[in-house]
Image (cartoon, helix red, strand yellow):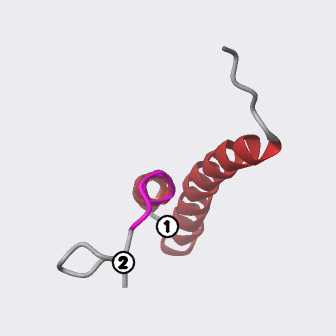
Amino acid sequence: MKTRWNMRSYGRFLDMGLQLAVGFGLGFLGGWWLDGKLHTTPLFSLLGLMLGAAAGFLNIYRAVYPVHDRTKDGNKS
């Protein structure tokens, strides 16, 4: 049987892709700006790119595996 995708499913995947792209972009741009101020051309751009990538992947991980608040006995509070 064929499954139908609804707009909510598309929106969720689009949101995850945008979070990843924004993480990469903001990390790189922040590093590029800092490189311009400190005259250390590739250093902070690369560090910012890596930190932005890590932040983007962390956002995707949190979206895929949401945290559930549970008490010690396993019941929801």
Disc 1 or 2, which lies upstream in sequence? 1
Give the number of marks: 2
**Residue nearest the observer in this picture, 73 or 33:** 73
Quadrant occupied by the N terminus: top right
In the rendered image, which residue does mark 2 sit on? 76
**Residue nearest the observer in this picture, 10 or 5:** 5
Residue drawn where x is 68% and y is 52% of the image: 15
Residue most extreme to the bottom: 77
Say whether residue 22 is left or right of residue 53: right
Instruction: State the separation of the CA atoms marked 1 and 2.
Output: 53 Å
Dot 1 alpha-carbon crowd within 10 angstroms: few under 14, some 14 to 19, many 20 or more: few
Q: What secondary structure is the stretch in magenta mostly built from?
A: helix
Residue 65: within the magenta? yes
Q: As displayed, is residue 10 above or below residue 36? A: above
Assess whether mark 2 and mark 1 are in contact (beta carbons under 8 angstroms). Answer: no
Q: As displayed, is residue 25 above or below residue 4? A: below
Check disc 1 and report its element: helix, strand or loop.
Answer: loop
Q: Nearer the viewer, mark 1 or mark 2?
A: 2
Residue 23 x/y as whole percent: 56, 57
Residue 32: within the magenta? no
- The numbered disc on residue 39 is 1
Residue drawn where x is 75% and y is 32% of the image: 5
Residue drawn where x is 61% and y is 55% of the image: 19
Region of the chain picked out in magenta, as a range: 60-67
Residue 66 x/y as whole percent: 44, 62
Q: Amino acid at mark 2?
A: Lys
Quadrant occupied by the C terminus: bottom left
Residue drawn where x is 48% and y is 73% of the image: 38
Check disc 2 and report its element: helix, strand or loop.
Answer: loop
